[in-house]
Amino acid sequence: MMTLQLATMYCAVSGSLARLYLNRPEVHNAANWAWVKDLVTVTDYLQRQPDVQVVIVSGKGRSFCSGLDTKELAHGNLPLEWFDTWERGMTALSALNAISIASIHGYCLGGGLQLALACDLRIAAEDAVLSIPAVREGVVAALGPMRLARLIGSSQAKWLCLLGRRFSATEGQRLGIIHEVAPPEKLEEQTNALAEELLSLPFTALHHTKRQIDLAFENDIATLTEEFLQAQQECLQSPEHAELMAEYRAREAFRKK
């Protein structure tokens, strides 16, 4: 196992699975200057791990992440450069080749929800509390509203972002933000099961499917078609596809006996 230990988070890589832990439990993993710099560092590290196929993001202590450190914001310690660094980290997380899973418990507020939205899949404990309340602090929630609008539509995104109200994991699932809701004591087990299911699937196909979905919001049909054909060619030539098709042929031959 390889471990990258940073001031506010650490990452453990074992084979095809990486676990990224937010590690400021005394402040519910709130994001300060060190936090955003560490996120940029750790996402760069993960992108350079060619064997990593799934990344689980979770928080140590009582919460996933309570967002930006409001105390730092109130004292003027989070200038525009901080927000630029923040978004570089979020964009890098969303652009990972690996499939990312946010495993959410406790508070998932503001930047915490933005972090979860930058992941591909989200599982939350039943008692998780979510919101994106940046307007209540007089700031913009970086690109969080845009990611939310792409996920659930502009109408629901406006309702959540303009009012900044808190909502439950069950409500988040109803809105299409949360994919699975688990009892608190089963959250880790359920997250691991999802990771194992993803790891059992052909990664070449998973990677390109993720990329196609992401590009659907950026490119026209002609460009998407070209991207698709290139992706399909790589899938058809991948060892995973060859193995699956060999298994299919073997089952077909067996049935004909």
Image (cartoon, grey):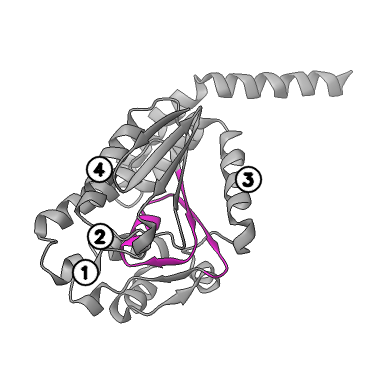
In the foreground, 250 or 84: 84
Q: Which residues are magenta?
A: 100-127
Secondary element under disc 3, as helix, strand or loop, is helix
Question: The C terminus lies in which quarter of the figure?
Answer: top right
In the figure, 95 relative to 14: above or below? below
Q: Label 4, on which residue? A: 40
Answer with mark 4 or mark 3, whichever residue precedes in sequence: 4
What distance separates the C-alpha of mark 4 from that of mark 2?
Answer: 16 Å
Tell me the mark number nearer the camera, choosing from 1 and 3.
1
Q: Which residue lies at the image location 26% right of the left edge and 44% below the top edge?
A: 38
Answer with mark 1 or mark 3, whichever residue precedes in sequence: 1
The single residue placed furthest to the right in the displayed view is 257
Please state which amino acid type lies under the numbered disc 3.
Ala
Answer with mark 3 or mark 2, whichever residue precedes in sequence: 2
What distance separates the C-alpha of mark 4 from that of mark 3?
Answer: 28 Å
Q: Is residue 44 left or right of 17 when viewed as pictured? A: left
In the foreground, 247 or 139: 139
Secondary element under disc 2, as helix, strand or loop, is loop
Tell me the mark number nearer the camera, choosing from 1 and 2.
1
Q: Label 3, on which residue? A: 193
> Residue 240 at what x, y percent from top left?
57, 23
What distance separates the C-alpha of mark 1 from that of mark 2?
Answer: 22 Å
Tell me the mark number nearer the camera, choosing from 1 and 4.
1
Q: Label 2, on which residue? A: 143
Please state which amino acid type lies under the numbered disc 4.
Val
- Labelled pair 1, 4 in contact (Cβ < 8 Å): no
Q: Label 1, on which residue? A: 71
> Residue 211 at what x, y percent from top left?
39, 40
Q: How many marks?
A: 4
What distance separates the C-alpha of mark 1 from that of mark 3?
Answer: 37 Å
Tell me the mark number nearer the camera, choosing from 4 and 2.
4
